[in-house]
Amino acid sequence: MLWTDIGPYFSIRVWFDWLRYQNPLLGLIMATGGLLFMFYGWRITRAAITLSSALLGALTATTLADNLEFGPAAEAGLVALCATLLAALGRRSVKIAAAILGGVLAQSACVYVATWLSLPAVVVSMSGTAVGLLVASLAFILFDHVVIFVTSLEGAVMLVSGMMIILAERPATMAALRDLSLNNPLFIPMTFVAPTVIAFCLQLSEYQEKDAARPAT
């Protein structure tokens, strides 16, 4: 697996190919939603987790349908079913949904970093699983912190993807960014890490201020 891959089903090349064919309006919506997640995620916890769970369900169903070679109608039905089920989980059991989301995101990030460091495949797999389980378990202890992590990272991904879709209207710029992403191992990590860290710190600071202002019980 190359450093440009996250697991067996996603790669930076696939991501860029997808971005090229999206409507700029979608890019604007994603960028706006990303900013909302990044800076207000913990304030809209239930809504953010519900929407994120639905997206995770849709992505999982799409991947499964592609691997099983489902037809368009069957794939659409599976996507709708998985998105609905996980959205319902996020609505009814927000801690469990946050644990799943946090674990998946942490595992994906760990797999990417471990692959980028050219670690053996078994180490990549074991470290990703361990980190994913650790973050998932923390959702039941430090729930608000995991929500802030999830919304910060998801918001960063949405913001960057939305901006890339808008930039896709300029083919020369998009081609330059694609080449930079594929040839410079630091570009994509920093593109996502920087806004994630900024959003996490800002949200955490605001949360701690609000928490400190609450009357002691």
Image (tube, grey):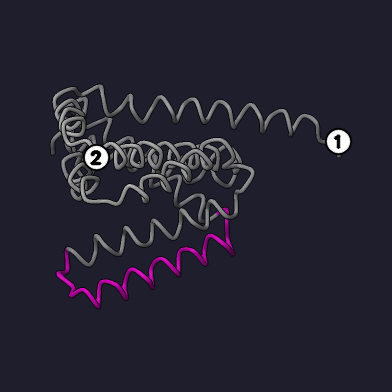
| Foreground pick, 127 / 31 | 31
Closer to the camera: disc 2 or disc 1?
2
Residue range (magenta):
67-95
Seen from this angle, which residue lies furthest front?
A: 170
Whether the magenta-drawn stretch holds residue 81 is answered as yes
| Foreground pick, 202 / 113 | 202
Rendering coords of residue 71 (x, y %): 18, 75
On the rendered structure, is 166 left or right of 100? left
The residue shown at (27%, 62%) is 62
Q: Which amino acid, by three-letter code, is at mark 2? A: Ala
Q: CA distance from mark 2 to mark 1?
A: 50 Å
The residue shown at (45%, 57%) is 53
Which quarter of the image is occupied by the C terminus?
top right
Quarter-wise, where is residue 85 in the image? bottom left
On the rendered structure, is 181 left or right of 50? left
Kindly identify which residue carries mark 2.
168
Kindly identify which residue carries mark 1.
215
| Foreground pick, 106 / 74 | 74
Whether the magenta-drawn stretch holds residue 80 is answered as yes
Mark positioned earlier in the residue sequence (2 or 1):
2
| Foreground pick, 36 / 212 | 36
The residue shown at (38%, 61%) is 57
Q: How many marks?
A: 2
